[in-house]
Amino acid sequence: MPQLDFANPLTISQVVWMFLIFGALYLLLARWALPVVGEVLEHREKRILADLDSARIAKEQADAAVAEIAERSRAASAEAQAEIAKAVAAAKAEAAEKARVDNEALERQLAEAEQRIGVARNQAMGALREVAIDTASTVVTRLTGHPADPVSVEAAVGHVMTARAA
């Protein structure tokens, strides 16, 4: 191989310069470039770890906030249900009281109406008794041609009206 002919003085100088350049590059990289790259990587790792820590903390805070919101929502829902139940109970009590008052008023009105009906019935029965006595006397007089005995007509009408009332 002609490239590796060490008998040629030019090949030896090229090899020497290659070792010197690679040595200088090695020293330059080892002393200056690689420590800078190492610092950048360490800084980047620290920043990533810090970001992960802050993300973990933010997630924990968000989870705590979600749990608090859920708890408040449950509490508000329970409070609303209690208020609804309270309002329903109050409305039922108010309706029951109103129904009781209305029933009492209706019972009073019904008793008054029954009393008025009783009075009217008694008046009607009294008038009916008189009409029945007059009618019976007139019928007996027309049928027999003699005036009827008022006491016996009154007793007969009273007997018939008592039997009908029962």
Image: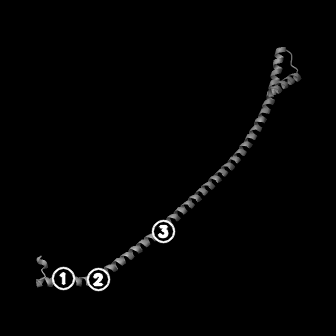
Q: Nearer the viewer, mark 2 or mark 1?
A: 1
Q: Which residue is mark 3?
A: 60
- Distance from Cα at disc 2 to Cα at disc 1: 18 Å
Q: Which residue is mark 2?
A: 30
The first of marks 3 and 1 along the sequence is 1
- Distance from Cα at disc 2 to Cα at disc 3: 43 Å
Q: Position of residue 111 (x, y in %)?
A: 75, 40
- Distance from Cα at disc 3 to Cα at disc 1: 59 Å
Placement of the N terminus among the 4 image quadrants = bottom left
> What's the residue type where badge 3 is placed?
Glu
Q: Secondary structure at mark 3?
A: helix
The first of marks 2 and 1 along the sequence is 1
Q: Nearer the viewer, mark 3 or mark 1?
A: 1
The first of marks 2 and 3 along the sequence is 2
In the image, taking residue 88 as reference, residue 18 lies left or right, namely: left
Q: Which residue is mark 1?
A: 18
In the image, taking residue 2 as reference, residue 104 lies left or right, namely: right
Q: Which residue is drawn at the image coordinates 54% and 61% (left, top)?
A: 73
> What's the residue type where badge 2 is placed?
Ala
